[in-house]
Amino acid sequence: MNEYDSHLVESQLVSMGASIVDNMDAADFVLLNTCAVRGKPVEKVKSVLGQLRLEKKRRPLTVGMMGCLAQLEEGQQIARKFEVDILLGPGAILDLPAALESNERFWSLHFRDELHDFIPPPPQGKLQAHLTIMRGCDHRCTYCIVPTTRGPQVSRHPDHILKELDSLLGAGVQEVTLLGQNVNSYGIDQGQRIPGIPSFAELLRMVGSSGIKRIKFTTSHPMNFTEDVVQAMAETPAVCEFIHLPVQSGSSRVLKRMAREYNREKYLEHIACIKKWMPDAVLFTDIIVGFPGETEEDFQETLSLYDEVGYDSAYMFIYSARPGTPSYKHFEDLPREVKTERLMRLIERQKEWAMRRNSRFVGRDVEVLLRGDAFNPDFLEGHTRGQHATIVPKVPGMDKAGIYTVRVEQVTPHQFNAKFLDAQGHTLEPILAPTPEAALLSSPLPMA
Ligand code: 5AD
Ligand code: SF4
């Protein structure tokens, strides 16, 4: 979501005549897009703002802060301390031109409805793009600050979504990721079905008939999970066989304290439904370890759920007590060592399963979107339909970004090493034999 908003802001700046530089020292204006979900990114923002405050003493420089942290009192205190000139809440990013024209400190935290209709110019020269289908969240998970920072859920009208999709297609985009805090409840805002807005399953079919080659989406909340979405996925060829279904914990007791509105059994029913429609689907999840009151038995339930589902991968987080959330107010944080030790054990489990699950692809031909050169320019890098980071050695005539079928030769828990095929289905030899460095080119899954 932040990447999408960064692109939106970047396009506003470019249309105002600015150019984007990749180094803060060369910039007249630095705008930090912030995250408030965990404490660590907040510390990072403070450290960068500290550097920028010093820099401002040396030369003319405008400093801005946007994103979830900007919406919080915590963020506004930080902004005051570090003399931030422009502060834009997640709903106020269209105020950026006005902010830059103003000669005074400009802080805007209101939500502008035009944001839902705004269609940013498409990214240039990219095969992949994000597309926001809704903003905000109607859930109240006790650990989560997002409903406070991003407000209640508002679904975008399908006309705007399809118009934006058209513009992406026109710019050569081949894979789109539909974004929302909880895509499964698309069209049902604050418990009310919005007239004229399709369900998420219907939207998937509409996007699927646009001519786009690959569709992914994130994130689904198990509470709003419905079989018609899985059916639409299975029946729409462009929709990738990839589901990210955050579970957060395998213990029903912890799930209740998190106010997740489902229990372990219900979650496993959803997994069974996915496996029924798409037996080979790639499954990702999010897990928080060390939620207040989580016992060793609760944690064992998370590990056993991991084994029962057999996830392809997981984003794993240590619980971070965020001021303003119910769990911060009402529950006591567990000791840091307990949380860290559990995370380590979970990461081990994740790696074992990722290796086991990835191994099923060895020798198989898979579709990969290669977005361009890897760190080592003898290789191209990209992702499969199941989100596996993949590298492929270039061969004569096959050195450009695009969607290809490749044969998986080796896997690690983080990466596929694959080869191009010729018309007869034989693997093509690379210009250079893969070096041991190839192993270093992987982009490991983000973990906290
Ligand atoms: N501490 C740790 N992880 C969190 N997440 C959300 N809030 C917190 C928190 N306070 C994680 C959840 C969510 C993902 C985006 O971030 O796992 O799915
Ligand atoms: Fe946060 Fe829960 Fe909403 Fe996800 S569903 S954004 S975890 S409150």
Image (spheres, helix red, strand yellow):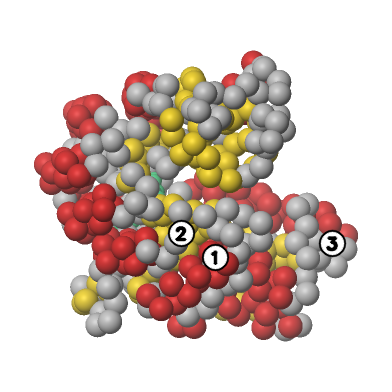
Dot in front, 2 or 3:
2
Q: CA distance from mark 2 to mark 3?
A: 49 Å
Residue, x 48% and y 75% (percent of image)? 163
Tag 2 and tag 3, C-beta contact below 8 Å: no
Q: Secondary structure at mark 3?
A: helix
Q: Secondary structure at mark 2?
A: loop
Dot in front, 2 or 1:
2
Vertical arrangement, residue 441 with respect to residue 321, above or below: above
- N-terminal of the pair, mark 2 or mark 1, is 1
- N-terminal of the pair, mark 1 or mark 3, is 3
- For label 2, the crowd category at 10 Å Cα-Cα, with few meaning under 14, some 14 to 19 and many 20 or more, is some
Front one among 93 and 291: 93
Instruction: Give the residue number, with chain letter if any, for mark 3.
Output: 57
Instruction: Give the residue number, with chain letter if any, for mark 1.
Output: 168
Q: Is residue 295 visible?
A: no
Q: CA distance from mark 2 to mark 1?
A: 9 Å
Q: Amino acid at mark 2?
A: Ile
Instruction: Give the residue number, with chain letter if any, for mark 2.
Output: 212
Residue 143 appears left or right of 104: left
Tag 1 and tag 3, C-beta contact below 8 Å: no
Residue 353 appears left or right of 226: right
Residue 399 appears left or right of 313: right
- For label 1, the crowd category at 10 Å Cα-Cα, with few meaning under 14, some 14 to 19 and many 20 or more, is many
Tag 2 and tag 1, C-beta contact below 8 Å: yes
